[in-house]
Image: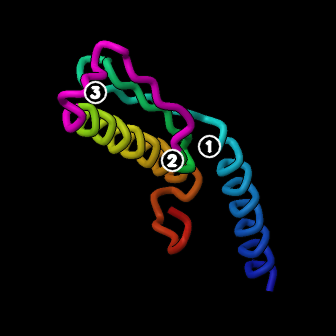
Amino acid sequence: MRGMNDLVRQAQMMQKKMADLQKELAERTVEAQSGGGMVSVTANCSGEIVAIRIDKSVVDPQDVEMLQDLVLAAIKEAIKQANELREAEMTKITGGIKLPGIL
């Protein structure tokens, strides 16, 4: 019975650590760029885009598609970086065990 109590206590500790980490990750940000830095996107590690910066020189009414592509590329990269950081931090807590619904 003691082994079961220890297991429950460890699970509760891991759950608290994960909740704390999720709060911390919501505040941590990553930044990705495209077009040689002409478009910059900042995302938090919860996967939310928190800022987009576009250099004036890339705004060309005759080539809106290029701007759209640059913004999309930067967003995809920012989300990818945020996901990788979140997974790396969660792995530190879970020891590499994949827990359904956590990541």
Q: Nearer the viewer, residue 101 or 77?
A: 77
First in sequence: mark 3 vs mark 2 = 3
Where does label 1 land, which residue?
25
Does the stretch in magenta take in 54?
A: yes
| Quadrant in which the N terminus appears | bottom right
Report helix, strand or loop for mark 2: helix
Q: In the rendered structure, are the residues bearing label 2 and label 1 in contact, judged by CB atoms less than 8 Å apart?
A: yes
Where's residue 91, x and y in %?
Answer: 50, 52
In which quadrant of the rendered view does residue 78 lie? top left
Where's residue 95, x and y in %?
Answer: 51, 56
Residue at 28% over, 27% down? 34
Which amino acid, mark 2? Answer: Arg
Q: Is residue 92 among the parts visible in the rendering? A: no
Where does label 2 land, which residue?
86
Residue span colored magenta: 49-66
Where does label 3 land, which residue?
34
